Amino acid sequence: MGTTEIIISLIGGFLAGIINTLAGFGSIITLAIYMDVMGIPGHLANATNRLNVMSSSTIGALTFYKNGKLKLDQGKSIIIAVFLGAMVGVYMATQLDAAGFKQVFKYILLPIFFVLLVNPKKFITPDTESAITSPWITMPLYFCLGIYAGFIQAGFGIIFLLIVVILSKFDLVTANGLKVAIVALYTLIIIAIFHFNDMIIWKAGIAMAIGQGIGGYVSSKNMVKMKGANKWAYYILILIVFLVILKNFEVWTWFG
């Protein structure tokens, strides 16, 4: 890992931090940078990407805690279900080589792109009047979502919020606090597992995490005040994911 790669990580992380703050899905951007710009094998990129996730989720959890908005006691069963699922997911991730992960990743991109187009954020509206959905339905959903998070993480947050707000009837503030706390918890264990499997490229991961933290800070302080910044970030995100899909499916070869 040379100086050029570290600079790419810092700049890529900075841009991802801006887009993540304004539109979300930062993990998919940093993962794409690792794989498609820096040429890091997919399974190692997936492992290294967790350092960015750990950095942002820990800062988020501490912020919620500092402001008295972190209420873990309300979501103990959810935490357990997601955590157990994440342990299954990370085990699956350690069993794939670069080719296997790249094959899985490109097909995961398709539903992620669909989710982006649908923009489910607009459907996250708390409804405290209706009854809470049975745990017999929600707990398997949380467990399955945990498997996905442990395996690849990208896009976990928005799906988690949909389930916890619409089905489990949490308010958005409590749901967001629970989300970042859960991510920080399982990501800490996941990083240890990936590390002991010698799958993390620490220099690139730390540089990317620093860049993403700076980008997130800058955007939260300044760009959210710019008219239409969120909309433009959303369009840029869709474009990035679309281009990553084109590259991974090598669409240009279909017409050769």
Image: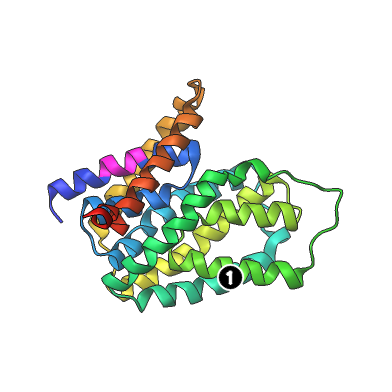
Q: Residue at position x 85%, y 57% from top?
A: 131
Report if residue 64 lies within the magenta region. no
Report if residue 11 lies within the magenta region. yes
Q: Residue at position x 72%, y 43% from top?
A: 125
Say which amino acid is labelled 1: Cys
Q: Mark 1 — residue?
A: 144
Residue that sits furthest to the front in the current view: 255
Q: Bin the neighbour count of mark 1 within 10 Å (Cα to Cα): few under 14, some 14-19, many 20 and up.
A: some
User: Is 103 left, or right, of 171 in this rendering?
Assistant: left
Q: SS class of the residue under badge 1? A: helix
Does the image show residue 233? Answer: yes
Which part of the image, by quadrant, shows the N terminus?
Answer: bottom left
Q: Residue at position x 31%, y 58% from top?
A: 249
Image height check: is 183 above or below 229? below
Does the image show residue 180? Answer: no
Residue 173, x across and y down, in percent: 67, 44
Which part of the image, by quadrant, shows the C terminus?
Answer: bottom left
Q: Main secondary structure of the magenta part?
A: helix
Which sits in the foreground, 199 or 227?
A: 227
Residue 233, x across and y down, in percent: 44, 34
Residue 146, x across and y down, in percent: 55, 67
Stretch in magenta: 10-15
